[in-house]
Image (spheres, rainbow, N blue to C red):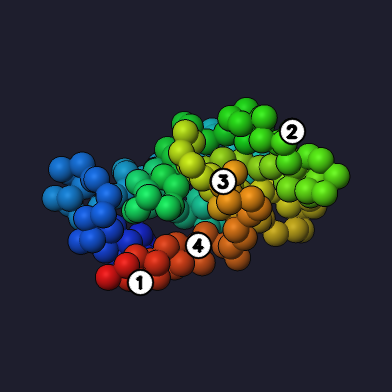
């Protein structure tokens, strides 16, 4: 995943479609310093969950990651990660009617890892059972419904593909 994030950073800075800091441009890196194992553990404890291994790997590479363009969310630093219900509870209510109840239920248990105060979120949704798989959603209210991703690496591969399509 390290190489993938580096490629995204370099391509996003090369395209210059988005404003990056002078330090990001100089270093060709839109990520942050890695989170420590202790920071990850304490956040898991605070949330009462254990993150999926690919998200832990991401955090060990970059504790936050700037949006590479205006259609992707910024991944938050570990201290800002929280349950969706604590960040945007109104949307859970809005998506809890009969026809889209499934979305409301997923939002109610999801964890926001990207996009706070932006137009779209990146969500990790814990499995219903211990043996189940985590769900990865990019979710925007202006584009009803969710964009499901197999895992975090698949999401970032899609981001890189999109950046190359912009060339």
| Distance between the alpha carbons at the discs numbered 3 and 1 | 23 Å
Q: Is residue 6 visible?
A: no
| Distance between the alpha carbons at the discs numbered 4 and 1 | 15 Å
Q: Is residue 19 visible?
A: yes
Along the viewing direction, whichever of 29 and 11 lies nearer the viewer: 11
Horizontal side of residue 28 vs 69, given as left or right: left
Q: Which residue is mark 4?
A: 155
Instruction: Residue lying at the far right in this picture: please name it.
Output: 98
Q: Which badge, 3 or 4, comes first in the chain's sequence? A: 3
Q: Which residue is mark 1?
A: 165
Contact, CB < 8 Å: mark 3 with mark 4? no
Q: Is disc 2 placed on a helix, strand or loop?
A: helix
Q: Which residue is mark 2?
A: 93
Please tell me the numbered disc located at residue 16: none
Locate the N terminus by quadrant: bottom left
Q: Is disc 4 placed on a helix, strand or loop?
A: helix
Q: Is disc 1 placed on a helix, strand or loop?
A: helix
Report the residue at 27% width, 70% height from top.
167
Marks 3 and 2: which is nearer the front?
A: 3
Marks 4 and 1: which is nearer the front?
A: 1
Q: Which residue is mark 3?
A: 142
Report the residue at 72% width, 36% height from top.
94
């Amino acid at each position: 995943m390290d190489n993938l994030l580096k490629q995204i950073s370099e391509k996003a800075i090369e395209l210059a479609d988005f404003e990056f800091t002078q330090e990001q441009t100089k270093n060709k890196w839109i990520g942050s310093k890695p989170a420590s194992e202790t920071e990850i553990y304490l956040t898991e404890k605070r949330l009462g969950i254990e993150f999926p291994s690919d998200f832990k790997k991401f955090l060990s590479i970059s504790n936050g990651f700037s949006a590479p363009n205006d259609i992707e969310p910024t991944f938050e630093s570990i201290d800002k990660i929280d349950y969706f219900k604590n960040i945007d509870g109104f949307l859970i209510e809005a998506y809890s009617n009969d026809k889209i109840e499934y979305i409301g239920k997923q939002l109610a248990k999801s964890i926001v890892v990207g996009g706070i105060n932006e137009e779209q979120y990146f969500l990790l949704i814990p499995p219903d059972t211990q043996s189940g798989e985590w769900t990865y959603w990019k979710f925007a209210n202006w584009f009803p419904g969710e964009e499901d991703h197999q895992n975090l690496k698949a999401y970032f591969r899609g981001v890189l593909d999109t950046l190359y399509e912009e060339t």
